[in-house]
Amino acid sequence: MKLGHVMERKQYNGSVSAVQKGVDVMLTVDVMTAMQSGIDTLIILTSDTDFVPLLQQARFAGVKTAVIGRSGVSSQLTKVADVACSLVMD
């Protein structure tokens, strides 16, 4: 597992939380490398529409794509993925 750059983000209530930056780019590079190696299926767990271009490129290359979103999958992602579903957490 690769980690991005951890940065602190101040919340409106004054608290501070840690967030990762750069993960999208690292995942995209890993997927593009894997596509060159001949993967046939890509499954990503995200609700982030930043991955729409990646999914489009994967499908263009003949890779089957699936997106699993935590609190619903945006219509932008469902339009470009072969399969999209929501993960319901209790």
Image (cartoon, grey):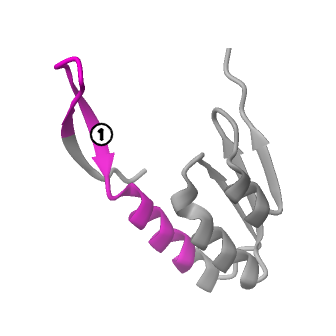
Say if the magenta span includes residue 18.
Answer: yes
Q: Amino acid at mark 1?
A: Val
Report which quarter residue 68 is drawn in. Answer: top right
Q: Which residue is mark 1?
A: 19
Residue 50's place in the image compared with 60, above or below, is above
Residue 65's place in the image compared with 37, above or below, is above
Image position, residue 64 (x, y; %) = 80, 69
Secondary structure of the residue carrying numbered label 1: strand
Highlighted magenta segment, given as a residue range: 8-33
Q: Is residue 61 left or right of residue 4?
A: right
Mark 1: few/some/many CA within 10 Å (<14, 14-19, 20+) = few
Image position, residue 13 (x, y; %) = 22, 17
Name which residue lies at 56% across and 62% down.
51
Name which residue lies at 21% across and 36% down.
9
Say if the magenta span includes residue 42.
Answer: no
In this rendered view, identify the residue nearer to me: 60 or 72.
Answer: 72
